Amino acid sequence: MRILVHVSGGKPDPWLAELRTVLPEAELRVWQPGDDDPADYAVVWKPPAAMLGRRPGLKAVFNVGAGVDAILELGDAVPAELPVIRLDDAGMGMQMAEYVTHAVLRYFRRFDEFSMQENAANWRFLKPYEKRDFRVGILGLGVLGRRIAEALAHFDFPLNGWSRSQRNLAGIQCYAGPEGFTEFLRHSRVLVCVLPLTPETRGLLNRAALAHLPQGAFLINVARGDHVVEQDLLELVQNGHIAGATLDVFNEEPLPRAHPFWKEPRITVTPHCAALTLRGDSIRQIAGKIRALERGEPVAGLVDRTKGY
Ligand code: NAP
Ligand code: GLV
């Protein structure tokens, strides 16, 4: 079995070493420009278009991340019949749960405001919020969204969820599709975005949508920067409609030094680290899926190209 590897922004050697451990029988090679030789599988992150064209024998592409936007944006360069398989949690769910729970608790317990007061040596009591006024709305009830919901449920936060298809999940008020979107927003004091980036979700969080959130709402974006129209968000934070935002992802990454988000005290910036790919867990998952495919069995995480995720 031949496996072709290309991991943008990372060194290939640790990936090859991990693959060698779990698939010792495989013949591994790092993709180089001009390599059109046959391969059975490709293991990729942000691959160049030339890598995934009509390569003889290619049975599937494994993305070493949850979001496949960088692959699908290659369009026709990726043959429609080529299965694209994404990571299915692989240790990301726990990290997302930690990140989002931290951000929600920070706003709920007003640590963001205490921190600003501390900087000004200002000892001032702030009345605690009530949980019933702090409903958390999760955009995306997939693998990661459900894990986040599970973590927040331990703290008794009332929960809303929004997905493409109607879901029925215990303890979550579920909304679906464009018809459920406004009502979902109107009842979400904290908005958590964990959607895939698709033509339908790009720019979804614009001024019109964010204005439906209750006055003094909070935004936590751990999905993709392009879900948010950044200028609209900035203005809504500056006029107080949005009381705070915690953003892990941006229109341009790294966030440019001159970007106004750096200077806005009510916006917290982290460097796209909400849930990292854990190499060992991911490669073990991919190896398990390769074995399942070789036996002719179905695998989780197969991307539906018509939906875009
Ligand atoms: P997933 O399991 O595919 O779940 C996607 C969810 O979004 C599903 O509930 C889906 O609805 C919903 N959805 C998709 N399109 C929609 C639309 N047009 N309207 C309403 N709902 C829609 O994905 P996941 O594994 O949870 O990952 C989600 C995203 O997190 C990834 O795509 C990636 O961009 C991002 N991510 C970020 C980081 C980071 O470090 N910042 C790390 C990992 C992942 P249905 O339930 O109806 O299908
Ligand atoms: C990271 O952003 C991922 O999609 O896995």
Image (tube, rainbow, N blue to C red):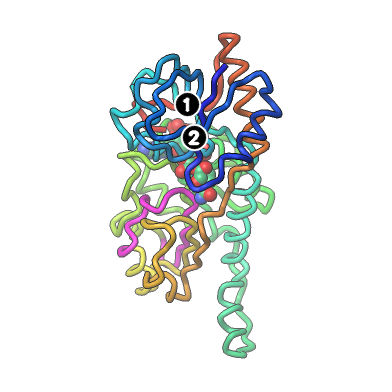
Disc 2 residue type?
Answer: Val
Q: Is residue 118 above or below residue 292?
A: below
Q: Circles 1 and 2: CB distance less than 8 Å?
A: yes
Instruction: Please state the extent of the stretch shown in magenta in the rendering.
Output: 214-232
Residue 6 in picture, x, y percent from top left: 49, 36
Image quadrant assignment for residue 149: top right
Q: Is residue 142 above or below residue 249?
A: above
- Disc 1 marks which residue? 61
- Disc 2 marks which residue? 44
Q: Secondary structure at mark 2?
A: strand
Residue 208 in picture, x, y percent from top left: 28, 56
Residue found 63% across the figure and 24% down from its top: 287
Residue found 56% across the figure and 45% down from its top: 11
CA–CA distance between discs 1 and 2? 7 Å
Residue extending farthest top: 296
Counting residues from the start of the chain, the first of labels 1 and 2 encountered is 2
Q: Classify mark 1 as within 8 Å of ligand 2 or not, answering yes or no.
A: no
Disc 1 residue type?
Answer: Val
Residue 122 in picture, x, y percent from top left: 60, 89
Residue found 38% across the figure and 37% down from its top: 48
Q: Which mark is residue 5?
A: none
- Can residue 185 be seen here? The reply is yes
Whether residue 293 sits left or right of residue 58 in the image: it is: right
- Can residue 173 be seen here? The reply is no
